[in-house]
Each structure stands twice: as structure tokens, then as C-alpha cells.
Amino acid sequence: GCTRKEGRMSYILVTGGVISGIGKGIIASSVGTILKSCGLHVTAIKIDPYINIDAGTFSPYEHGEVFVLDDGGEVDLDLGNYERFLDIRLIKDNNLTTGKIYQSVINKERKGDYLGKTVQVVPHITDAIQEWVMKQARIPVDDDGVEPQVCVIELGGTVGDIESMPFIEAFRQFQFKVKRENFCNIHVSLVPQPSTTGEQKTKPTQNSVRELRGLGLSPDLIMCRCAMPLETSVKEKISMFCHVEPTQVICVHDVSSIYKVPLLLEDQGVVNYFCKRLNLPVEMRPRKMLTKWKEMADRSDRLLEHVSIALVGKYTKLADSYTSVIKALEHSALAINHKLEVKYIDSADLETTTLQDEPVKYHEAWQKLCSSHGVLVPGGFGVRGTEGKMLAISWARKQNKPFLGERFHMVLSHILYQSCLSFSDANSTEFNPESKHPVVIDMPEHNPGQMGGTMRLGKRQTIFKSSTSVLRRLYGDVEYVEERHRHRFEVNPELKHHFQKKGLQFVGQDVEGERMEVIELDDHCYFVGVQYHPEFTSRPIKPSPPYFGLLLAAAGKLQSYLAKGCRLSPRDTYSDRSGSSSPDVDITELRFPSL
């Protein structure tokens, strides 16, 4: 091991060049993962140069999914990658935006904290950025509450953007403030391979590194994103023009599964490099945590059986809008040894208006729905496509197809029962604020006049009210669960007994007993609605129980699984420590259950 003072913090800054969306998030997560597998405590900060205070008001098309944290922070989807890869729990201050920094500086200026000085980008904004990073890096993110030793910071956007300049300048100063041996920079660049000549081009990388150096940061590692592995001559060329050793040029080519990226970095000596460069206290023995990743990567390549899930939503044109949902489905499919196929269906295409306007679209959408093994309706706001979602839910109910509905689809599942309840205008106040018989009502916390920050958000307890609930058994027969919420509406409690007569069971509610949180349908293979977002806490080795149930049911294995007393539940099969950073976990615990 290396010697190093206690309480010292190492910072690894990840910047990106040439284009945005180059994979900085996965690379930052993977760097954290391989360091965590050495037994270090790792935390992560994502910096987004946009002016929004948080991601809460983004359209999913604009910036991908909004990820929700324990404390209710609505953040960039990269924080979801950090949580899944590193199995940590972050808070909203781990996501730093230009808006947050300016807001904090302006508040201080209004209070007179700057004693009448002219408040400027340098030094006031840049100092605020450095203080934020130093403070946030020390906050424990693991269950054991130990202060982190390494902080990975990902700077969003591309080097040279006007909006990221204050951050680059802050880190230029920061490297001297924390000393060189505690700070290093990874620059992620693109090495294109135009089909005309088929050769790998280094010019974009040279330009991007030159620009970064001109701003006062020198990359320690240049990570090249490319389609095929880098040729030796290309590696040497980058090394020569960018003033780094060839060993500091790392190739991150496209791979079949993101679980392979940590292994790819490990194979190129990245851990050894950090160990020397940052003087990290690492024992150089074989690391078992990476074996787990290797198993997952190998396993995802070898899957033979298929399971298909219809994802019915309104943002289905962009997979990024549902990143966590798809990851949660993948984790569960991997746990039962099946290859996942997600069939994206725009809920509006299932509606009768589409049949008149675009019959081909209509029939294709229904064909996708009918040929899938299970149906998932994730959360979503707004009126468009609601009828289509209700049709899909109704179909799953009548055809006895496995179904999982999230957030307010609990609600829609109910509106289905409007015929049974004989209220002709049963509706939801989100769609029809004037409805006389609202099945779903605004929550007291919600103020309809304002868009940002008006929802029930973050980690909340849900208490199971029924001992026979399928979901309760999937969670390991616990009294309550803690999951993350992001919604504005809830079921009208006055109608609860009407639904129960029709076989719709409210099996979970909030601590006060006022809000319906989980519903299940009697006499159905798997029909579950939850008012929270279970996908945000799903991990590769610990699938989320509602999703796991959906995939077990879709693969026809749920009944045998429950009959065996849920012994195969991933939550029980792995020891609690398998998700933690302790490197001495026995590999046998990491084998997935064979079902």
C-alpha cells in the first residue's frame, strides 16, 4: 500500500471535448467503481453548466430523464449512473448547476456578506464553486457513514463552451489550492473513424487538449472514445501531440454492455496509475468486486432466453427519457437469466383517433402490445396519451398479462373502474380540474400555480396493510419499504371502499395512513400499481422488487418463485455486503440464483 495522511481527499476531474454526450458519465462512474473495488470510499459530483437550478422542470426530450434522490433532489440522469455503479446514495447538492452557484452568491450579496465589494465571476463565483466541491466531497454516501477518500467530479458539456468557463477557471485555481498530488484530470475525447478512409483521426483530440491546456488544465489521462480499439500508431500520435506518455492514453471503445467499461479501464492499468499519481492507500491484491462486474458482463453476453416488455408512455421516442426504468428492467431480467427486449409504444398510438388518422401506426402499436410478455406504464405528467395508457392497462387486466403501473397510473387503473362505480365523469384533476367525481385529487403540498418544486418528492415510507400482498412477499415480507416519490396527485381516499368491492386491493399506504401507495388486483397473475418510483433504487446486483416481480411473471416463473418462499430473492441471495465496497466478499455469494 501507499502511505498517505488520514483525512486527505483526492479529486478526479472528468472533462469532455469535441462533442457532448460522449460517455463522460459512464467513464466517471467506471473510474469510481474500480477505485471502490480497491476498498476506497468514493463519492461523485456532477456539474451542469446550465442555468436551471435543478432538472425538475426539464422535458425528458430536452435532457433525458429526471432522476430523483432520497432527499427529493431532482437531478441529471448521470447521478443515477453514479448511484447504480457505486451503490451509493447521493443528495441534491451532489449536482451543482450554474443556477445554484449564482443563486448562492447573489443571496450572500443581498445579505451584505461581501462588505460592499464589486461581486465578480473571478474571484467570487469561482471561490463559491471550489468551496461547494470541497464541502460536498466530505459528505458520506455509503451506508457505513464513513467520509469519502476520493471524489470524482464530472464537468458537463464540452471544454470551450462559454457557460462552463467559470468552472474550468475554478478548477485551474483548485489544482494549486489542494496541491497537485491530490488532483488529477481525465479528459474524454472522441477519435472519429470516417468511413471514407477508415482511419482513426486524432485531430479533434489534439485541438480539444490544446484548448484545455490553454485554459490552464493539463490532462493526466486522455480517454479516447472510439468505435474500434485504438491502433498503436494512433495512441503514440496522441501521446506525442498531447504531451502525455502512451500509457496515459486510454482506449474506451464501444462495448456490448456498460458493465464492461470498468473492466476495460482496469485492464489498461488505470488503478495503478491513480495509485501512484494520487498516492492512494490501496492494497494490490486481486479485487473481488470487479469479479462481480465480470460475471455480470459475461452473463449479459450469454443470455439465450428472451423476455419482452411493452413500455407504454408518452416520451418513447427517446430511450434516455426512461433510463432508470430500462436499467431496472435490465437488472431484473439479468437476475432471471433472460435477455430483455423493450418494445416502446407511444400511448397515443393505441387510441381510436390514431385508427382514423394513421391506421398503420395504430395496428403496429397494438401488435407490439399484444406480442409482449408484460406491460409497464411508467410515470408521466400531462393529458396527451392518457386514453392510450388506460386502454393498455385495461387490456393487461382482461388478458391476465403481467402489469406494473407507476405513480399516478395507480390512478388510471382506477378510472377503469368508473364503469363499475357508475360515475360518468370519474376523472383526474390533472386532466380535468372541474371533474365532479375526482378519482384522483391534488395533494395538499401541491400548489398548481407554480411548476418548479411543487411535488411530493424524495424518500418516503410505505407501510404494507396486507400480509398476503405479492409485492410485500417480493420485498422479503417486510413491514414497510422506503422508496422515492415524484408526483403531484393521489387517489381520492373517499372512494377506497368502492374499489375494494371490485377486487382492487390497497395493500400499502403512507405512514399517516391517508394516502394509497400500492394497489394489487385479485385473481390476476401480476397486476401492481405503485405511487412511487421503484426504479431509482434498483441496482445491478439488487433488482427492484416491483420490477423483479413483473419480469418473473412475464417469464412465467412468479408462482414457483413465491411457492418456494421467495428464497431466490436477490435481496436475500447476496449477503448485504456484496453491494458494498468491502473487497473480501466471497464470490460464491454473487452467483445469481438459478430459477
Image: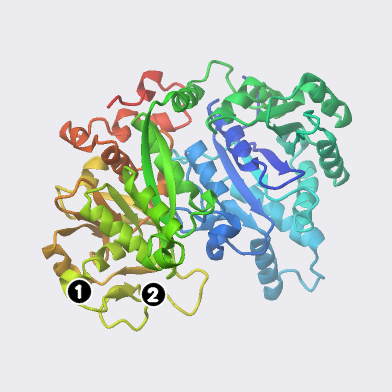
Instruction: In the displayed orientation, state which residue is furthest to the top.
Output: 285
Can you identify the residue that label 1 sits on? 494
Across and down, in percent, residue 555 comes to: 29, 36
Q: Nearer the viewer, residue 376 or 216?
A: 376
* Residue 281 can be seen in this image: no
Instruction: In the displayed orientation, state which residue is furthest to the left.
Output: 501
Question: How many residues crowd around disc 2 within 10 Å: few (fewer than 14), some, or many (20 or more)?
Answer: some
**How far apart are the alpha carbons under marks 1 and 2?**
20 Å
Can you identify the residue that label 2 sits on? 431
Please say if 230 is above or below 8. above
Residue 346 appears in which quarter of the rendering?
A: bottom left
Q: Residue at x 36, y 32 (%)?
A: 335
* Residue 196 can be seen in this image: yes
Q: Secondary structure at mark 1?
A: helix
Q: Amino acid at mark 1?
A: Glu
Q: Amino acid at mark 2?
A: Phe
In the image, taking residue 258 as reference, residue 96 lies left or right, namely right
Across and down, in percent, residue 589 comes to: 35, 23
Q: Earlier in the sequence, mark 1 or mark 2?
A: 2
Disc number lying in front (1 or 2): 2
Q: Secondary structure at mark 2?
A: loop
Q: Nearer the viewer, residue 550 or 357?
A: 357
Q: Which quadrant is the C terminus positioned in?
A: top left
Q: Residue at x 31, y 26 (%)?
A: 593
